[in-house]
Image (cartoon, helix red, strand yellow):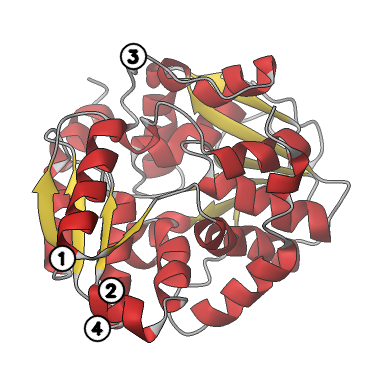
Amino acid sequence: MVPVSLAADVTVKDVERAAERLRGHATRTPLLRQDLLGSGLAEGVFLKPENLQRTGSFKFRGAYNTLASFTPSERRRGVVTSSSGNHGQAVAAAAQILDMKACVVMPEHAVQVKVDAVRSYGARVVFAGTTSPEREATAQEIGRREGAVVIGSFDDARIIAGQGTAGLEIAEDLPDADIVLSPVGGGGLISGVALAIKAKRPTACVFGVEPSGAADAAESLRTGKIVTLGTIDTIADGLRTSRVGNLNFGIMSRLLDGIVTVSDDEIREAMRDLAFKSKLTVEPSGAVAVAALLTGRIQVGGAKVVVLISGGNVDPSMYREILAGS
């Protein structure tokens, strides 16, 4: 078990400072009340649509908070990171705003729309393997060779604090929220959101949701230690992390009320519901928490529920097939 002292390295004060940094740069996404997602659900279901965030996902929050905290010397060195797509876009956009050089290491099978988006913000793209350890190793090597600052995508106090601003907004916009559902990949979003929600609304329950083909977080919480997956098989490309971060796990172990999993077919169905009933374009990773709600994995009764949609950067050809029911 990761010591609780690690979890104490990030506090709600850090989240509040991140919110100040992000003011005027990140979009304050609304809470959308939903009566269309399905019958028999809680009357008070609200979506937090981070697909409407700058760069199309919540990742901009953590990326900008991190880069904006760099010293002048670090900014001159530039930044390098590894990403399957959304974090890379966010870092590229934040670097462009802050007039910094950026390099993003992406998997060889990265979604093309995400590769194109990273490049559109002026960042250099380097491809490396198909797994997160391969990408991370390449990013470290580039950092050593070029003198750039290497940042991660989730196991970083600045990233966590930035992602936590989504939870801060939830607590401010719906102070009597009972349940918050969030996707889980490496743990940056869920740990930041849990910090903010539990500080502002201690009685609220925070649940994570991940694909059954990438259920390392659920297994880690069950066993009380970080579990690294040998294989990952899910349509949700943004959640294909083989393990959660150390800092993230400490927070999750202390604050989460549980983690549930959903299948790829259930994710597809949630994407269709979001498109046809809520009129929202959502990528597979962004739809997992909605899938958990629709399938009844978490019983909500008459509670006020907030469901985080983490992103909307979906591959167009995949999206057409999913909407057609293929």
Q: Secondary structure at mark 2?
A: helix
Question: As shown in the figure, which amino acid type bears the numbered disc 1?
Answer: Ala
Residue 136 position, x and y percent, is 29, 41
Q: Is residue 213 above or below residue 162?
A: above
Q: Mark 2 and mark 4: span between their CA atoms?
A: 6 Å
Q: Is residue 26 left or right of 290 when viewed as pictured?
A: left
Asked whether the beta carbons under mark 2 and mark 4 sit within 8 Å of each other, the answer is yes
Type of amino acid at the residue the image marks with label 2: Ala
- Kindly identify the amino acid type of the residue bearing the numbered disc 3: Thr
Question: In the figure, residue 314 lies in which quadrant?
Answer: top left
| Quarter residue 157 falls in | bottom right
> Decide: marks 3, 1 in contact (CB < 8 A)?
no
Q: Earlier in the sequence, mark 3 or mark 1?
A: 1
Disc 2 and disc 1 in contact, CB within 8 angstroms: yes
Q: Earlier in the sequence, mark 3 or mark 2?
A: 2
Distance of label 3 from label 2 (alpha carbons)? 33 Å
Residue at mark 3 to residue at mark 1: CA–CA distance = 30 Å
Q: Secondary structure at mark 1?
A: loop
- Residue 309 lies, in percent from the top left, at 49, 47
The residues bearing labels 2 and 1 have C-alpha atoms spaced at a distance of 8 Å
Q: Amino acid type of disc 4?
A: Asp
List x then y, in percent, for residue 58.
45, 57
* Mark found first going from the N terminus, 2 or 1: 2
Dot 4 crowding, Cα within 10 Å, few <14, some 14–19, many 20+: few
Quadrant placement of the N terminus? top right
Q: Quadrant of the C terminus?
A: top left
| Image mark for residue 123 | 1
Could you tell whether 45 is left or right of 141 in the image? right
